Image (cartoon, rainbow, N blue to C red):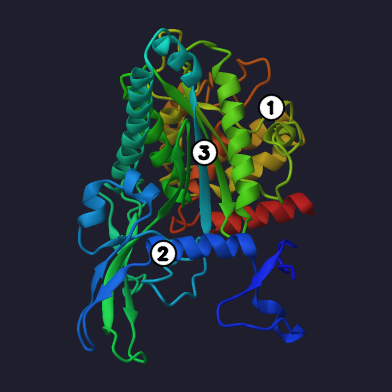
């Protein structure tokens, strides 16, 4: 008996005892079944209270969750649950919490970070040491990494709001200046049809889920609009640890329906790409911290470097991305440029503007040549009624010599632009002002794709 989706050995889902043809949809991958069984034993919360009463929820956390969740997050009311599925039609909020997407934006980020120089540091510091001393250093380093993860979670959560899904969109104002993205939201479960159970309970659903946080690797599944703040805080936290360590990271921005195996593979490739670039500045610890990200428009299945060589990242003789971006203070040898802070400054400046649809179309214009795209850029600037001072200042920090003439940094051997990277970040937020043609970023992107195809 094999699972229809994976082709691997399967078991019948709970409650099924036969293997008849009409039961084929109940076959579950045996590995997935084992994982679910473990999750049910370690994560299903305890609910206390009688019929007609508000329930008291006592979450249970896996060992991984206990290591990375700040104590305050595990004890604060309403109690925090980690999401366990990506289906928005899930009604059992307590026992099978769904990922808290914002509005109808169902995009995720798989963040994979890998420490740089850990092996060399450990070898140097433990030379001639006793086993107990080596073990203590290992535990201290692991604790420092977990503290960095806790700090990243706290940095994303600090000052952010919770969302009650009972409120209408009109009643719930979204702050799109980048300072307060949603982090978690309140959800209610009603069990009127189940005798002997409490009628309702209010909980918070985290907008992330830890996958790995041990050794020299950290992998998180997090809502895409929170990914950059989380990753920046994580890398900076690792740099602040008293061990001279650093890390590089990859962020795969994917649809919720994308298989995790492919998404994680892309995140690892991006992390390797960032680390390879960082080592060109300094090949011995401390190595500069950096991150690379990518939002695939087609199905995955090839390495990022192979993707980068294709025309979707190279047009008109210019790279359509400036990845990787430097994070943190950097070692004395220097840091990766351009910096993530400068990219986020450009994204925030663009977020305030109308007429961004034409900027996305510059990607298509570049295929006809840099001169064509730069002419369209100047045309776009001429018809703007809003000030472009912040945009120009950010572009200059990103290496553009004269933003009034071009959006491309021509200094490197292969010219590149950060404009489309910034637009990708802007597009992670759904509720934004429409452009001059009345289009939201999503419809503008669709129109651009259609124009390119036609």
Can residue 85 be seen at all in this image of the molecule? Answer: no
Tell me: residue 160, above or below residue 272.
Answer: below
Side of 430 where 158 appears, left or right:
left
Mark 2 vs mark 1: give the one in front: 2
Which residue is nearer to you in this view: 325 or 444? 325
Residue farthest toward the right in the current orientation of the protein: 454
Residue at horizontal 73%, vertical 53%? 451
Q: Say what secondary structure mark 3 lies in.
A: strand
Q: Position of residue 246 (x, y in %)?
A: 43, 22
Q: Which residue is mark 3?
A: 112
- Earlier along the polypeptide chain: callout 2 or callout 1? 2
SS at circle 2: helix
Query: Of the residues under marks 3 and 2, which one precedes in the sequence?
Result: 2
Residue at the disc numbered 1: 318
Residue 391 visible? The answer is yes
Residue 81 position, x and y percent, is 34, 61
Q: Residues within 10 Å of mark 3 (few under 14, many from 20)?
A: many
- Residue at image x 74%, y 68%? 2
Structural crowding at the residue carrying mark 1, measured as other residues with C-alpha within 10 Å and reported as few (<14), some (14–19) or many (≥20): many
Nearer-the-camera pick, 263 or 210: 210
Contact between marks 3 and 1 (CB within 8 A): the answer is: no
Which residue position is annotated with label 2?
41
Q: CA distance from mark 3 to mark 2?
A: 27 Å
Density class for disc 2 (Cα within 10 Å; few <14, some 14-19, many ≥20) is few
Residue 424 vertical placement versus 269 (above, below): below
| Nearest to viewer (mark 3 / mark 1) | 3
Q: Quadrant of the N terminus?
A: bottom right
- Whichever of labels 3 and 1 marks the residue nearer the N terminus, that label is 3
Q: Quadrant of residue 13?
A: bottom right
Q: Position of residue 216 (x, y in %)?
A: 47, 30
Q: Residue at x 54, y 12 (%)?
A: 281
Q: Secondary structure at mark 1?
A: strand
């Amino acid at each position: 008996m094999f699972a229809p989706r994976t082709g691997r050995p399967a078991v019948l889902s709970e409650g099924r005892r036969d293997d008849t043809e009409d039961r084929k949809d109940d076959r579950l991958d045996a590995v997935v079944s084992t994982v679910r069984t473990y999750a049910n034993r370690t994560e299903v919360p305890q609910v206390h209270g009688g019929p007609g009463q508000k329930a008291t929820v006592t979450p249970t956390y896996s060992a991984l969750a206990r290591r990375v969740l700040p104590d305050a997050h595990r004890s604060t009311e309403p109690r925090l649950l980690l999401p366990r599925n990506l289906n928005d039609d899930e009604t059992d909020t307590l026992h099978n919490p769904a990922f808290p997407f914002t509005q109808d934006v169902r995009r995720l980020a798989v963040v994979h970070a890998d420490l740089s120089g850990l092996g060399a540091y450990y070898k140097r510091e433990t030379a001639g040491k006793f086993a107990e001393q080596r073990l203590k250093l290992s535990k201290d380093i692991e604790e420092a990494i977990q503290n960095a993860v806790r700090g990243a979670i706290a940095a994303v959560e600090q000052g952010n709001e919770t969302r009650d899904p009972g409120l209408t969109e009109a009643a719930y104002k979204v702050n799109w200046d980048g300072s307060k993205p949603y982090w978690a939201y309140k959800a209610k479960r009603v069990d009127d049809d189940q005798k002997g159970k409490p009628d309702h309970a209010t909980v918070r659903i985290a907008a992330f889920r830890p996958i790995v946080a041990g050794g020299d690797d950290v992998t998180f599944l997090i809502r895409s609009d929170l990914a950059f703040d989380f990753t920046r805080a994580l890398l900076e936290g690792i740099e602040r640890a008293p061990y001279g360590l650093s890390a590089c990271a990859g962020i795969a921005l994917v649809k919720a329906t994308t298989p995790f195996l492919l998404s994680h593979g892309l995140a690892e490739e991006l992390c390797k790409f960032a680390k390879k670039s960082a080592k060109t500045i300094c090949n011995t610890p401390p190595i500069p911290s950096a991150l690379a990200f990518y939002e695939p428009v087609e199905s995955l299945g090839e390495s990022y470097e192979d993707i980068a060589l294709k025309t979707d990242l190279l047009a008109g003789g210019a790279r359509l991305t400036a990845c990787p971006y430097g994070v943190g203070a950097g070692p004395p040898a220097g840091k990766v440029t351009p910096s993530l802070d400068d990219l986020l400054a450009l994204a925030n400046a663009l977020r305030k503007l109308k007429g961004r649809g034409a900027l996305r179309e510059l990607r298509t214009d570049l295929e006809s040549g840099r001169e064509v795209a730069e002419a369209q850029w100047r045309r776009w600037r001429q018809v703007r009624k809003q000030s472009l001072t912040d945009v120009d200042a950010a572009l200059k920090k990103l290496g553009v010599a004269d933003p009034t003439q071009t959006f491309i940094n021509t200094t490197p051997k292969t010219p590149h632009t950060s404009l489309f990277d910034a637009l990708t970040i802007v597009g992670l937020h759904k509720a934004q002002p429409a452009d001059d043609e009345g289009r939201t970023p999503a419809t503008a992107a669709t129109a651009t794709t259609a124009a390119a195809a036609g």
